[in-house]
Image: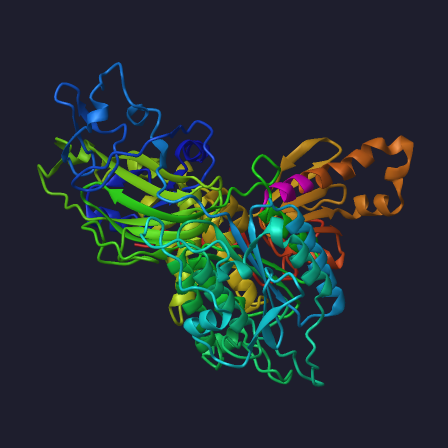
Amino acid sequence: MADFAQLEEVDGVRLTWNVWPTSKVDATKCVIPFTAFYTPNKRLPNMPVLPYEPIPCKQCGAMLNPYARVDYYSKVWTCPMCMGRNHFPPHYQGIAENNLPAELYPSYCTIEYTLNRTVPPHPPVYLFVIDTCISEDELSACKTTMTQAISTLPEYVHVGLITFGRHVHVYELGFSECSKCFVFRGSKEYTTQQIVDQLGVRAAAARPGAAGPAAPPNAPARRFLMPLSEAEFAINTALEELQRDAYPVAPSHRPLRCTGTALQVATALLGASVPVGNCQARIMAMIGGPCTEGQGKVVGAELSEEIRSHKDLAKDTAPLFRKAKKFYDGIGQELVAHGHSLDLFACALDQIGMAEMRDAVLLSGGMAVQTDTYNNPVFKESLKRMFTKDGEEGFLGIASNASLEVIPSKDIKVAGMLGPAARMEKKSPHIADTEVGLGGTTQWRMCGLDSETSLAVTFEITGSNKEGGETLAGQPQQTGQFFLQFIARYLHHSGELRCRVTTITRRWMDGSNVAELIAGFDQEAAAVLMARLASFKMDSEEDFDATRWLDRALIRLASRFGDYRKDDPTSFNLRPELSFYPQFMFNLRRSQFVQVFGNSPDETAYYRMALFRVSVPDAMVMIQPQLTAYHFNGPPEPVLLDVQSILPERILLLDAFFYVVIFHGTTVAQWRRAEYHLQPEHQAFAQLLQAPQAEAKEVIRRRFPVPRLVDCDQQGSQARFLLVKLNPSSTYSSASPMSAEVINTDDVSLATFTEHLKRLAVQS
């Protein structure tokens, strides 16, 4: 697995299978789909950035790359994707074996080009949307964090402010005489054109490069979105004067909150004011409760009406869900059309409707942060991290207005993509008949992506394994290479238009050669793909049993690639390349992505959104958290994610991505309560207590969204955060418990799970 992680550091690509069978029949027997995880904005230290444009193939559109065959005499290159011959342009006439351009160097399989701009870049735009139907304490904390975050922004950034309660208030920051707002009634249904007309902003800005008269310097659109250098006083004054929503809340009623109308107004304002595709533009919504008024309503105002649960969604007894989801999906499509992103900061104990808004955030490449209160460090630190500058700690490297195109070799077609993007209507001969996720195209749009945003592109092998079969690049197909090219065009955080081209090659292999196939199996990438695929199916298919689907896939994989004698479970053995995969599936079955019991629809939507965005190593932490033990007998060491890892004189550090747990064994907890660590003679104990705290801070510092820190003792109430993730090898029903802790659960242990797998895999 380390080898695959090292390969990812070179090109930002990770494949579930690194050797592919030549025929469709053999590919189907491999069970796990053939998928590439691509991180288009990954920071690659050795990647050159060239100051000119790439050279495309005239036939298939693939870019010149190190795998192209070059005829230096006739100045012609042969595309490895389609075998088409192309002449070099005039400025490449000096090309020779000892005078190569950078894109032909074998070590530069990933390379970036700076594209020419037809119009100067527009500064980044941040439109803040603030919920005022919250308590005074919450509003005060929100305002303080917002003011601090805005103070870190560069002066050239454009900002705008919208607040909402029962009605929506759009602040005209350019009106200097006094504070001036445009008000939209929350219960009324508006069209985008009505909003634009009422605000008096011009129609949607022209695309870059489009002819047309430039807007005058005092154009109306600037009244709402202003450079921070001009609007800092106005926006800070507006935030200081911001009060709770003035409308009284009736007893046993929820506040009337028009979240849907506010997001619709914000989307229309950005779409009409900002040039399309010419800058990073984000709606940053701070929401403190569910939408109870107007379009996008997720629950009624009366507290006697409960907000929808997973059971309601499964039985289709949530009357507002479908209509609200359709409304927010429409907002998402409008954001994608303009290249803008929606970021959600949900700070409430109640659900806010994130399950309905999920696709609007995912399609637009936005960020989501979920916590219980505006005073929580998760919200404060995550908001600050959004505005971190290049070179500072925790910089996200957010790019915008990106598109990803995938060009495969012959006999490979693109089935679809799972990730935070929207499909583009790009017709191509490389489109597969069966769709996986966002299919029917070979090109997708990402309005926003950070340096860790990872997209899973799934392929279908269409070759037929005929005797003396087809040839690839002049070689028999069984021994040939295939190529995949990823072309990502995006607006760099520096304002430059960039095009990143990654070309990778792997080997074809006869599907009957099981040992060669399994040698190229990446179990971590496969586990993350199955997690994304199961989550997608649970959201899009009715009555989908994810646990059974994962179990069947695992049994088929073990039966195909395991070593065993028929009907003899004791003879079953898995090769090292596959040995951890059952354990990953065991933890995935128990994870919050598959088990919705105990989680609200909003929490499930939040977890799945994060899973769809992050890279393979981070997703593996979500599926199988990392457990580290600290003790007196040596340095920190990784330990099994098992209840038997709990010992009285040990401190455990659990990294579960969304939260980090520091768990003190009973003896350590007693010593700490007795304050031994404050006594000079117990310096070693003080250092032992400090070590996991320092490591937890390091984890929190480099992750987005910022995880919650849980500091707890064994047998304390917060210990549940650790216990729920551990393998229950010792439970209340065990004949003789073998550990210092017993988990009260009816879940099967990993050992029982593995025994069942062996028995079912060897069945004839």
- Which residue sits at x=72%, y=48%? 663
Q: Quadrant of residue 332 in the image?
A: bottom left
In this orientation, which residue lies closer to the viewer: 31 or 321? Answer: 321
- What span is in magenta? 697-703
Q: Quadrant of residue 105 in the image?
A: top left
Residue 546 is left or right of residue 484, and the answer is: right
Residue 271: percent from left, percent from top: 44, 61
Dominant secondary-structure state across the stretch colored magenta:
helix
Quadrant the C terminus occupies = bottom left
In this orientation, which residue lies closer to the viewer: 226 or 51? Answer: 226
- Which residue sits at x=56%, y=61%? 747
Q: Is residue 688 above or below residue 289?
A: above
Q: Is residue 121 visible?
A: yes
* Number of dots carrying numbers: 0
Residue 524: percent from left, percent from top: 44, 43
Query: Looking at this rendering, what residue extends furthest in the top direction?
Result: 98
Quadrant the N terminus occupies = top left
Residue 128: percent from left, percent from top: 58, 60
Residue 117 is left or right of residue 728, and the answer is: left
Residue 485: percent from left, percent from top: 29, 39
Q: Quadrant of residue 638 in the image?
A: top right
Residue 314 colored in magenta in the image: no
- Which residue sits at x=14%, y=36%? 84
- Which residue sits at x=35%, y=53%? 207
